[in-house]
Amino acid sequence: MNSDSIPAPGSDLSAYLFLVNRFSQVRLKKEGEKILLVLPKEEKNEPIADWSKVWEELKYRLNNSERYWQDGSQVHLIAKNRLLDSRQLQIIAEALDGANLKLKWVCTSRRQTAVAAAAAGYSIEQESPNDSLADLSSKESDNSQQEPLYLRSTLRSGMEVRHPGTVVLLGDLNPGAIAIASGDIIVLGCLRGIAHAGASGNRESTIVALRMEPTQLRIADILARAPEKPPTQFEAEVAYIASEGIAIAKAVNFTKTHSFSPKIGGWIDVENELK
């Protein structure tokens, strides 16, 4: 170690700032038009007090980093496996706001963090502990092993949710909002935004909604847009891949009346086939 870089003896503040600057695992870096805020990985049996250390490091980074960003730049929080509750997310957002930055995305492998972030109105990207969701459509993963993500909130315009399994939304998917899942997408409300199920290539995936008025539907690599004339009556429906592309049927008894055929890579209406 270069002795010139060591704080003067007895200088507690200088020593603290030196250690924070040299060994900090909290990182801020620019990637295109956005800013990445990377938090350190949470270790097993990590003391709760370590959140205070992370918080102090974050404040130091924001207050002492060269302002290489434009005011209002969006921040993608890379939380990794760190558990963050709504209060901690609010503290981070307020600190970023003080630096003229806006928290937009939360990328995490922790389900609780993803739920808290979505409830706070942030776009979320939940990844598997050993997998990245940077581009869900290019991944071939076994989403059957992923637990569903349950969100008790409405996805507003500008929000986006990405998950390596099934997404269950107890609320509406508004116009301008996007849900992307490697498994199914189930909206227990009105689906008016964009839904992309089977994003890793699973053509067996489906999209279910109590009220189906999508801007766009996509299952695996098949795309469908909303009809020009919306229906006058609504009931629970399921969108699925059929031989002619994406079709929509009544959700009631769907699994009894339809069967997935690996041969054609889509669902078959069993009742019509038997006629």
Image (cartoon, rainbow, N blue to C red):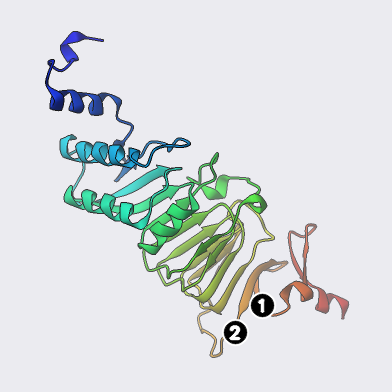
The residue labelled by disc 1 is 251
Identify residue type, mark 1.
Ala
Which of the 4 quarters of the picture holds residue 36?
top left
> For this rendering, which residue is in front, 50 or 118?
50
Residue 165 as seen in the image, left or right of residue 255: left
From this view, report whether residue 13 is shown above or below residue 222: above
> For this rendering, which residue is in front, 166 or 216?
166
Identify residue type, mark 2.
Glu
Element type at mark 2 = loop
Q: Which mark is residue 272?
A: none
User: Can you name the residue that lies furthest to the bottom here?
Assistant: 232
Residue found at x 66% / y 77%: 251
Element type at mark 1 = loop
Structural distance between the alpha carbons of marks 2 and 1: 8 Å
User: Can you name the residue that lies furthest to the right here?
Assistant: 274
Which of the 4 quarters of the picture holds residue 258?
bottom right
Residue 155 as seen in the image, left or right of residue 240: left
Viewport quadrant of the N terminus: top left
From this view, report whether residue 4 is shown above or below residue 162: above
| Residues marked 2 and 1 touching at CB (< 8 Å) | yes
Residue 81, how many percent across, how many down? 46, 43
Q: Is residue 29 visible?
A: no
From this view, report whether residue 173 is shown above or below residue 230: above
Residue 274, how many percent across, how many down? 87, 77
Residue found at x 54% / y 49%: 136
Residue found at x 69% / y 60%: 204
Circle 2 Cα neighbour tier, 10 Å, few/some/many (<14 / 14–19 / ≥20): few
The residue labelled by disc 2 is 235
Q: Is residue 76 visible?
A: yes
